Structures are given as structure tokens and as C-alpha cells.
Image: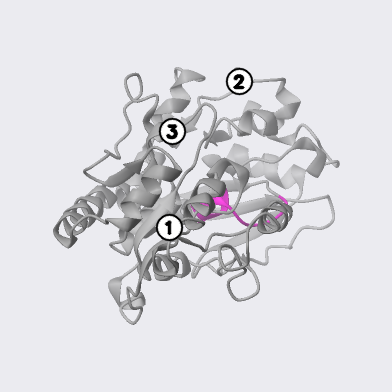
């Protein structure tokens, strides 16, 4: 069984790259490899071979290693970086990401926001020492030679959320952050009856959430159980999504779009129909993603469209059709399928 290293450089857990790393671990495992998540730390503060649980993802663990051990790992096995970090978080060796890439560590580009995270390489998209892997085709706008491999996704068994009732019309499991444009949803809520409003349930960016809450009445936007955060497990976001018929996500990345995100796949897993802003497909002519409007997802153009949709939701037959199509799409992201694609590329 081949060892494969997955480097996670972020100082804290949370967000899409954490979810990605956990699913990639399971994908490597399903493809027959022995994945190891590495978190690089200051010399002398490693875990001495003791593995710790990665978030609360069942069966997913990590090792803390120092920079010298990291170099040895890159030279001894195929490795890939699942999550970068700004150089300021690694004062003990600010250029460690670049140094490891120079000796063979591959990297995954998640979205254009990461171009500022690789700040020690220079401004904007730059030539990387190794061929990058991207999770959406739009990243080829910046790295033409990038290899697109879809998100790995380990589907949660229906038994894990069978007890959850689909009792509400609309929710949003997208994180509460500026790029997710929750104001479009909250402005719609201001004009909707209570039973029609979208409940925001995503993980919060604390200061952004605090400032946002001050702009809306409590009945429109309030804390759910004290904080907007669910446990970092494979099951938790799927269970939340299952409560709703529709899952709203208004994401706008300045230079990205068209492909999948984990919030959408978790909703698909729960047979909840995603509703996204139509500008997610603004690069579609050049870089066509796999998620198709009308087939896998419903689309809106803004607040007025959200209101119209919630006042007159599609018939149950249409929602069921989209849910079935979405489950089929998830098969393209199955752990063994994606794991084999990564192993093939990392072993070149």
C-alpha cells in the first residue's frame, strides 16, 4: 500500500479546504493508498508520530511535523497540498510552501482568492514550480496547463439522516461571508412571510456576521442555537441540508464559477435542491462546468427572483427530477473514482 502525503498549511480548521482535505483523504484511501495528512509546525513542536483527529471527521487523522521532516516526506512519497496559508502564519520558514513545491509537492488551486495566499511567490497568478491541479475548470484561465480533477466527495449514507424531517421550505448552508452575498437572501426575507423566509445556517465569519446582524431585524436574521456552526463531520452539513426543500447559495468569486462547491454537494446528498445565482455561470461559454442550470440546480438573478421563487416554488415533480439528476452527478465525485485520478497524476 503506497503512502501519499496531503499537506494542510492553514493554522486553523474550517471552510472548504478543510472539507476538501477530509474528502481527499477518503478518496486516496478508497483508491487503495495510505493517506497521511501533514500539518507543518515550528521545529521541536511536532507530534512525535502521534496522530490526531482531523476535525471530527471519522477515520481522518493528521500528523504534526517540522519543516525538515516535511522535506523528507516530499522526497520519499507522492505529496499534494490540500490547503495553503499566508507566509505570516509560518514565521519559522515563510517560504516553506515554495520550497516544498520545488522538490516535488503538488498543489491544488481551489479559487482565485488563493493567489494572494501564495504571497511569497509574488502578486497575482504566477508560474508554480509544479503542475497545479484545479477543482473547477475556470482556474485554467490563470493556469492553462492545470489539470482539472473534480472535488472528491464521500457520500453520506441515507441512514445517517433518515431521522431528519424535511420540514422547511428554504435554508442556506453556505458560509456567512461577503463572497456568499447573504444580503441578497436577507433582503428577500424582509419582503416574505415567515414560512417563506430562507434560514441562514452556514458557518459564520464572526465579525462579518456581527455587522450583518445589526442591519436586519432579529426576526429576519438571528443566531441559530447561539452560533452559526455545525460540527466538522461528513454527516452534519448533510443533516442540516435535509431539513429544507431548497438550499440557497449566492456565491460570487471575482474570477471563478461554474463548478461544484461542497455546500452544493452536501445538499445534493440530502436530495435538497440547490438554488444559485445565475452569474455563477458567467464564464460558461469558455469554461463549461458540470453543474447545469435547470438540470442540477435552480437559478435566480437577484432578490426579486428569490422572492418570486419562494412565493411560487416549483412543483414537487420538478424538484424530484433535479434531486435525481444531482445524485447521479455525485457519482462523478465518488472517492474511488477521484482517488484513482489523483494517484495516477501524483505518480507520474
How far apart are the two marked residues, 3 and 1, measured between alpha carbons?
A: 25 Å
**Residue in the picture at 50% in, 48% down:** 4
Q: Is residue 335 above or below residue 55?
A: above
The residue sitting at the left extreme is: 317
Which residue in the protein does label 1 denote?
26
- The location of residue 51, given as percent across then percent down, is 63, 66
Who comes first in sequence, dot 3 or dot 1? 1
Residue 28 appears in the picture as rendered? no
Q: Considering depth in this image, is 307 or 105 the residue closer to the camera?
A: 307
Count the marks.
3
Q: Secondary structure at mark 3?
A: loop
Task: Out of 247 and 143, give the one closest to the viewer.
Answer: 247
Residue 225 visible in the snapshot: yes
Tag of residue 125: 2
Look at mark 3 in the image and give the residue it sits on: 257
Q: Is residue 50 left or right of residue 288?
A: right
Amino acid at each position: 500500500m503506497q503512502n501519499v502525503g496531503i499537506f494542510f498549511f492553514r493554522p486553523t480548521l474550517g471552510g472548504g479546504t478543510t472539507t476538501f482535505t477530509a474528502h481527499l483523504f477518503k478518496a486516496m484511501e478508497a483508491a487503495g493508498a495510505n493517506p497521511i495528512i501533514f500539518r507543518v509546525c515550528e521545529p521541536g513542536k511536532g507530534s512525535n508520530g502521534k496522530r490526531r483527529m482531523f476535525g471530527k471527521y471519522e477515520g481522518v487523522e493528521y500528523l504534526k511535523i517540522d519543516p525538515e521532516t516535511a522535506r523528507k516526506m516530499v522526497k520519499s512519497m507522492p505529496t499534494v497540498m490540500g490547503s495553503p496559508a499566508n507566509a505570516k502564519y509560518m514565521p519559522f520558514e515563510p517560504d516553506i510552501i515554495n520550497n516544498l513545491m520545488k522538490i516535488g509537492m503538488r498543489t491544488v488551486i481551489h479559487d482565485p482568492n488563493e493567489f494572494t495566499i501564495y504571497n511569497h511567490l509574488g502578486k497575482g497568478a504566477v508560474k508554480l514550480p509544479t503542475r497545479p491541479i484545479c477543482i473547477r475548470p475556470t482556474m485554467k484561465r490563470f493556469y492553462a496547463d492545470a489539470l482539472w480533477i473534480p472535488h472528491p466527495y464521500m457520500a453520506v449514507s441515507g441512514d445517517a439522516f433518515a431521522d431528519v424531517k424535511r420540514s422547511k421550505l428554504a435554508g442556506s448552508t453556505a458560509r456567512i461571508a461577503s463572497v456568499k452575498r447573504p444580503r441578497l437572501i436577507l433582503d428577500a426575507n424582509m419582503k416574505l412571510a415567515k414560512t417563506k423566509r430562507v434560514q441562514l445556517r452556514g458557518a459564520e465569519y464572526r465579525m462579518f456576521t456581527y455587522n450583518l446582524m445589526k442591519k436586519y431585524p432579529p426576526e429576519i436574521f438571528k443566531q441559530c442555537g447561539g452560533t452559526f456552526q455545525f460540527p466538522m463531520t461528513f454527516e452534519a452539513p448533510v443533516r442540516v441540508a435535509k431539513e429544507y426543500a431548497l438550499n440557497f447559495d449566492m456565491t460570487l468569486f471575482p474570477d471563478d464559477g461554474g463548478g461544484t462547491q461542497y455546500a452544493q454537494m452536501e445538499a445534493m446528498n440530502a436530495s435538497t435542491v440547490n438554488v444559485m445565482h445565475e452569474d455563477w455561470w458567467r464564464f460558461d461559454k469558455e469554461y463549461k462546468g458540470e453543474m447545469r442550470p435547470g438540470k442540477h440546480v435552480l437559478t435566480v438573478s437577484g432578490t426579486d427572483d428569490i422572492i418570486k421563487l419562494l412565493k411560487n416554488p416549483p412543483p414537487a415533480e420538478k424538484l424530484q427530477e433535479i434531486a435525481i439528476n444531482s445524485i447521479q452527478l455525485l457519482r462523478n465525485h465518488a472517492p474511488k473514482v477521484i482517488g484513482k485520478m489523483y494517484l495516477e497524476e501524483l505518480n507520474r
